[in-house]
Image (spheres, grey):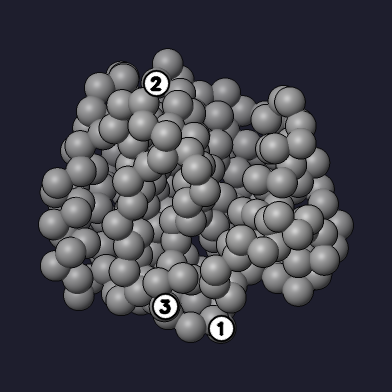
Amino acid sequence: MCRMFGIVATMPQSIAPWMTDVEPSLRSLAIADKSGEANPDGWGIAWYNGEQDAPHVVKDPGPAYESLLFEQTAREVSACVALAHIRRSSGTSSVLANTHPFIAGRWAFCHNGHCSRERLMEHLLPKFRNGLEGENDSEVYFALLLQHLESETDPLDALRDAVHEVASVGDFTGLNFLLCDGRCMYAFHYSTDPERHSMYLQHQSGRELVASEPLGAASWEELPNGSLAVLTPAGHTLVSLV
């Protein structure tokens, strides 16, 4: 069902603790998450340094728990803003084009759940439909979010309208996402099975964390179903989208 992690901090942070060092870590969730199932179908890490126009990204379609590159990247990344994803495919192939996070300009995106790729494709303008590279539903979901973000002034209105459009076509289980522009991170939790597609927040001095499951031994706060958390270095706010 995929697992995700995000951080927004005032100062550059090593992401290695949550990737590999604590228990559970994102790597251990790739072996088995709380459902007891593995997330072996690829991994990716995206991060921002300074004010560059696009995030750095390293990803691979193989299992994180077998990847020396995953460990190396986790230990090398030190950033104020980063997100990571481990994938369990819902049927599409484990190739790089289907591996999260997806990048478009300054935006980075990863998804946990399933939505109807075919139905959503009908809602995309040619500009966004023609830019698709993979074959999975998550990339189409990202494209629809971008389509609304481009056409609407207020990002919260854009995300709300996009989520309602995705939900309106039906045939979805989880619409959880992490979406980041390098300055703030939008963490959304919405599912027909909220426990399966869970999302948690953790506030620490100078940094905000989000994860699909609590990582490490510290306490985490569950993000309510239907809620969007907007994470900035100063803290987070909650907005109801559904």
Q: Nearer the viewer, mark 3 or mark 1?
A: 3
In the rendered structure, find residue 76 and report the number of the disc placed on it. none
User: Residue at horizontal 76%, vertical 32%?
Assistant: 152
The residue to which callout 2 is attached is 233
Which kind of residue does numbered mark 2 sit on? Pro
User: Residue at horizontal 68%, vertical 56%?
Assistant: 128
User: Residue at horizontal 14%, vertical 46%?
Assistant: 76
Pointer 1 local density, CA inside 10 Å: few below 14, some 14–19, many at least 20: few
Which kind of residue does numbered mark 3 sit on? Val
**Relative to 51, is 103 on the left or the right?**
right
The residue to which callout 1 is attached is 91
Q: Nearer the viewer, residue 140 or 54?
A: 54
Residue 7 x/y as whole percent? 36, 36
- For the C terminus, the quadrant is top right
Q: Secondary structure at mark 1?
A: loop
The residue to which callout 3 is attached is 95
Residue 21 x/y as whole percent? 16, 52
Q: Is residue 106 placed above or below 32 in the rendered structure?
A: above
Q: Nearer the viewer, residue 211 or 117?
A: 117
Q: Name the quadrant containing residue 43.
A: bottom left
User: Residue at horizontal 50%, vertical 76%?
Assistant: 89
Q: Nearer the viewer, mark 2 or mark 3?
A: 3
Which kind of residue does numbered mark 1 sit on? Gly
**Relative to 181, is 24 on the left or the right?**
left
Q: Could you give the CA–CA distance between mark 2 and mark 3, rounded to whole angstroms?
A: 34 Å
Q: Could you give the CA–CA distance between mark 3 and mark 1, rounded to whole angstroms?
A: 12 Å
Of the numbered discs 2 and 3, the one sitting upstream in the chain is 3
**Relative to 42, is 92 on the left or the right?**
right
